[in-house]
């Protein structure tokens, strides 16, 4: 019987889930107000857009790329949502419009990276700054406040005791996990990330897939911006400044290799929750919030170092096994 | 290379092609700026402008060498290193340490911060992007934490001369720091074995290893050098502003990468010349001071820098067929 290669979550994802559980237990012990349903709901609601953006970021990173501009793009989309909400535009139209803007921005990134073959770090570093300036210009130095809670049912509502966003996020993760694992688009992403040359020789349309992945990330960011504006009720200048760091951290902690080819959305979800719980715990325990980025930065470093060490050990063990078999 | 040619002349020829283009660009930019303001073309004004570029010269040297050494070498933490070193200097001065001693410690601190990067990248094998992304957040956040977000003042007046003094109309920063350091590095990179090793490692690190070049040590020392240069830059910054701020370094990594790429340094490594990078520094400096005089917000400057970066990468790729990812 032919064996199909299905990238299922493995040891690395279990490691992250284990860390998440340890973290939950730790914070519950350290603080009484942690493990309450109000707090847990808050954690999930506050991290909804991070979770969604991280889906797209996972796809891009598995493909071997990266996108530093997601925060600024979220900013632009959020402003558009804000302005449309104030103007009373139909919510469905808002959703479509903002996803389209995200797609366009994503296509710009993807086009520069895949078609013009420019390095992804540099392109997204540049677009991050360019879009940030556009955000600044669009806001005109002020904030957008007092937005009507049109989408409020989604962001703050509950169904059967679970926050609606939680179910929404889960649904998106399941859908994209299915695409990544069983559909050719997703598997092509894994292939390109593993070995681009081999993928090209195997007939995969590398450039097109690349562009589509960046565009998909853009659409996802557009979608997430609706949740963001709805939750915050306002858009300020610093919108999204931490987003790229946090989503890269979530993806990396969740076991996706930064070099590409390996990783899964299961791990990313665990990574997102890990970071969300961490941020919440930091506030509850009174750790100075200025250190938050330092902690996340350190976590990123530790995760990647762990990955490298584990890979090394695995390779050694594999070599020993080969020697023993020989 | 033919018999009778050495590395020096080969690289020099690379300089010539890019250099001519940059000189033309520089003249164009000066032309545009002087049309915006009649005071621009004054000799003393032009000399005064150079102070804005002194720190960038230091960082650009460090960044260019790292990118030249290949394997995706990049340092996103260079700005944060400047911030953190500056904060360390400020804190020492606040506790009564002699300012010049504090400056030396600050430079050393920069070197240590750079060494941390180098250790992870060259010896443990972390991808430079993610490693320096992590450390940039770590260092930046630590700087904010130590200062509580407030600038540190209390520098003695004797310290002022370095950053704000003029010698025959030329800023002290440039004459006493930027130019000597550049001259030193010119000598080290283009007249010593180490410099040749840097380019060779960038061109083909496997061949370099088999030629008995200590690849890991070379890459490690480049990160240390970048850190030392960043530390020196923070000394100049502290003297210039007469305060130590945790956000001095924001955006500096973007600037250093932009001038490196504009100056012809290719992301695949082993190409480009520091002289061209210096011309790029001049262009960016003239541009940003012109924008400053025209009262354009610094947010836009970052955006313009982003566009210059994209333009520079496109330039590298298309016209000169360099930096192509095959």
Image (cartoon, coloured by chain):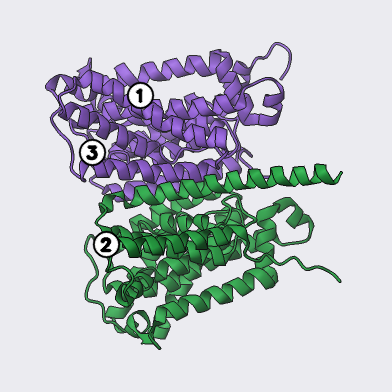
Chain colours: A green, B purple
Helix or strand or loop: what does disc 3 sit on?
A: loop
Determine which residue is flagged by label 2. Answer: A284
Q: Nearer the viewer, residue B320 or B89?
A: B89
Give the residue displayed 22% in from the left and 76% down from the top.
A146
Label 2: how many Cα within 10 Å (few below 14, some 14–19, many 20+) = some
Counting residues from the start of the chain, the first of labels 3 and 1 encountered is 1
Q: Position of residue B231 (x, y in %)?
A: 34, 28
Q: Distance between the residues labelled 3 and 2?
A: 28 Å
Q: Residue furthest front?
A: A29
Marks 2 & 1 on one chain: no
Q: In this rendering, does residue B315 appear at all? A: yes
Label 3: how many Cα within 10 Å (few below 14, some 14–19, many 20+) = many
Tell me how many marks there are. Answer: 3
Q: In this view, does B93 lie above or below A157?
A: above
Determine which residue is flagged by label 3. Answer: B245
Mark in front: 3 vs 1: 1
Q: How far apart are marks 2 and 1 (CA)?
A: 37 Å
Helix or strand or loop: what does disc 2 sit on?
A: helix
Label 1: how many Cα within 10 Å (few below 14, some 14–19, many 20+) = many
Label ID, residue B108: 1
Helix or strand or loop: what does disc 1 sit on?
A: helix
């Amino acid at each position: 019987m032919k064996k199909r290669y299905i990238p299922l979550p493995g040891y690395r994802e279990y490691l992250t889930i284990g860390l998440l559980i340890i973290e939950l237990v730790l914070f519950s012990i350290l603080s009484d107000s942690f493990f309450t349903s109000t707090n847990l709901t808050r954690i999930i609601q506050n991290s909804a857009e991070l979770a969604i953006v991280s889906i797209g970021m996972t796809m891009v990173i598995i493909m071997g790329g990266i996108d530093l501009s997601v925060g600024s793009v979220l900013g632009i989309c959020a402003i558009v949502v804000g302005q449309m909400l104030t103007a009373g535009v139909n919510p469905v139209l808002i959703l479509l419009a903002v996803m389209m803007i995200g797609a366009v921005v994503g296509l710009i990134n993807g086009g520069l990276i895949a078609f013009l073959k420019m390095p992804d770090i540099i392109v997204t570093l540049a677009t991050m700054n360019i879009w940030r300036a556009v955000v600044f210009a669009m806001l005109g130095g002020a904030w957008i406040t007092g937005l009507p809670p049109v989408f409020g049912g989604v962001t703050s509502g509950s169904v059967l005791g679970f926050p609606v966003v939680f179910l929404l996020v889960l649904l998106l993760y399941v859908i994209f996990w299915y695409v990544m694992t069983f559909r050719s688009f997703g598997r092509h992403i894994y292939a390109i990330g593993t070995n681009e040359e081999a993928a090209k020789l195997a007939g995969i349309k590398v450039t097109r897939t690349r562009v589509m992945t960046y565009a998909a990330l853009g659409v996802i960011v557009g979608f997430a911006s609706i949740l963001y504006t709805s939750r915050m009720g306002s858009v300020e200048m610093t919108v999204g400044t931490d987003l790229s760091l946090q989503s890269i951290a979530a993806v990396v902690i969740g076991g996706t290799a930064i070099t590409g080819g390996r990783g899964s959305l299961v791990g990313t979800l665990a990574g997102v929750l890990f970071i969300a719980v961490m941020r919440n715990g930091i506030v509850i325990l009174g750790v100075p919030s200025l250190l938050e980025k330092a902690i996340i930065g350190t976590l990123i470093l530790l995760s990647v170092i762990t990955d490298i060490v584990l890979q090394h050990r695995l390779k050694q063990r594999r070599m020993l096994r080969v020697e023993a078999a020989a | 290379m033919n018999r009778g040619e050495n590395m020096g002349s080969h690289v020099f020829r690379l300089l010539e092609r890019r250099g001519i283009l940059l000189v033309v660009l520089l003249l164009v930019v000066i032309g545009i700026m002087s049309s915006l303001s009649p005071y621009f073309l004054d000799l003393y004004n032009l000399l005064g402008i150079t102070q804005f570029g002194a720190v960038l010269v230091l960082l650009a040297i460090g960044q260019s060498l790292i990118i030249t050494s290949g394997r995706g070498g990049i340092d996103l933490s260079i700005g944060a290193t400047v911030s953190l070193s500056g904060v360390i200097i400020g804190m020492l001065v606040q506790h009564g340490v002699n300012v010049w001693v504090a400056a030396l410690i600050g430079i050393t601190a920069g070197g240590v911060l750079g060494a941390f990067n180098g250790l992870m990248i060259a010896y443990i094998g972390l991808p430079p992007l993610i490693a320096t992304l992590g450390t940039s957040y770590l260092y930046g956040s630590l700087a904010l934490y130590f200062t509580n977000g407030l600038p540190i003042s209390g520098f003695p007046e004797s310290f002022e001369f370095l950053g704000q003094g003029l010698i025959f109309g030329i800023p002290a920063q440039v004459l006493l720091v930027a130019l000597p350091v550049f001259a030193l590095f010119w000598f080290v990179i283009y007249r010593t074995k180490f410099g040749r090793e840097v380019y060779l490692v960038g061109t083909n690190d496997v061949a370099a290893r088999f030629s008995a070049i200590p690849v890991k040590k070379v890459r490690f020392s480049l990160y240390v050098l970048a850190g030392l240069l960043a530390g020196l830059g923070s000394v100049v910054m502290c003297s210039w502003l007469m305060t130590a701020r945790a956000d001095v370094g924001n955006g500096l990594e973007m600037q250093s990468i932009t001038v490196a790429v504009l100056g012809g340094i290719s992301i695949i490594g082993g190409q480009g010349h520091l002289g061209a990078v210096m011309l790029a520094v001049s262009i960016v400096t003239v541009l940003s001071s012109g924008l400053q005089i025209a009262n354009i917000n610094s947010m836009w400057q970052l955006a313009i820098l982003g566009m210059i970066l994209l333009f520079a990468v496109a330039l590298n790729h298309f016209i000169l067929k360099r930096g192509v990812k095959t």
